[in-house]
Image (spheres, rainbow, N blue to C red):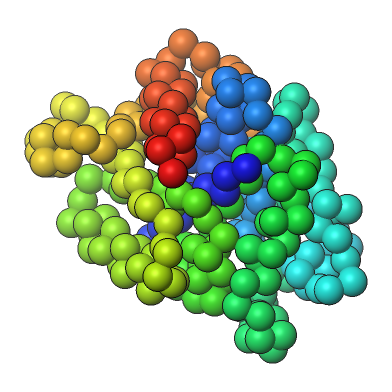
Amino acid sequence: MASIAIYSVKGGVGKTTFAVNLAWCAATISRRKTLLWDLDASNGSGFLLGIDPKKKRTAKSVFSADREPKKLIQSSQYANLDLLPADESIRTLGRQFDRIGKKKRLAKLADQLTKEYDRIIFDCPPVLNEVSTQVMRAADLVIVPLPPSPLSTRAFEQVVDEVRGSGKSHPPILPVLSMIDMRRTLHREAREANRKWPVIPAASAIERCAVECKPVGEFAPRSPAARGFAQLWTAIERKLAKK
């Protein structure tokens, strides 16, 4: 089993779109039993999969000692892909972690799910707090979407500092250039400066994910966007295999 965190301290970089499409690739291309764990209060992952969270479910119920997280998991319409959804109450999760004083609570819960899932993908909140720190302790790999801009470079440096600060055995980080449009000078320069980084192109098909409420590989399997996510997932599997 491997846990993969999709993380950024900056909103609007496509983090949730990455999480959903990579989870779909894990389940469909690799045919691995996959859990997409949404830790972002907006519940964007659930929306893109066409799943509404149960209204009575709270973040506290996931992390409390008397509740098994697998009882809160919802099946998606795709084989091998399930969702542990978020809701508004997850906004208080950082304070809950502070109260219970358990620094590896999330990692231990993820370990409980290893018998059920081959891959767990975390859609992380775009903040630096106790939740993000716990995710870093649970993750085997951190994926960081980076649109080509100076602000993104600064955000990436913050992510690196956060990951390294999570412990001595911090997970490796894989930066990914997102929303790349090679017609634009700044984007070409970013690509030339980071030739080894995977790339996800700017594409209308990716924007349509929110309209279709489906991963791009479902409704536009031959599109450059679908190929980009498939190639990124292959790179992720190779990186995990080297651990």
As displayed, is residue 113 above or below residue 117? below
In the rendering, at what x and y percent does residue 46 appear? 69, 45
As displayed, is residue 223 above or below residue 57? above
Q: Quadrant of residue 190?
A: top left
Judged left or right of residue 153, residue 56 is: right
Residue ID at (88%, 53%):
71
Residue ID at (58%, 30%):
26
Q: In which quarter of the image is residue 10?
A: bottom left
Q: Quadrant of the N terminus?
A: top right
Residue ID at (11%, 35%):
192
Judged left or right of residue 220, residue 197 is: left
* Residue sitting farthest toward the top: 222
Q: Which of 177 and 111 is in front in this view?
A: 111
In the rendering, at what x and y percent does residue 132 appear? 51, 67
* Total count of labels: 0
Query: Is any part of residue 132 visible from this angle?
Result: yes
In the rendering, at what x and y percent does residue 193 appear? 11, 41
Q: Nearer the viewer, residue 53 or 227?
A: 227
Judged left or right of residue 173, residue 220 is: right
Q: In which quarter of the image is residue 163?
A: bottom left
As displayed, is residue 6 above or below residue 183? below
Query: Is any part of residue 51 visible from this angle?
Result: no
Q: In which quarter of the image is the C terminus?
A: top left
Residue ID at (32%, 46%):
175
In the rendering, at what x and y percent does residue 119 appear? 62, 40
Q: Nearer the viewer, residue 218 or 205?
A: 218
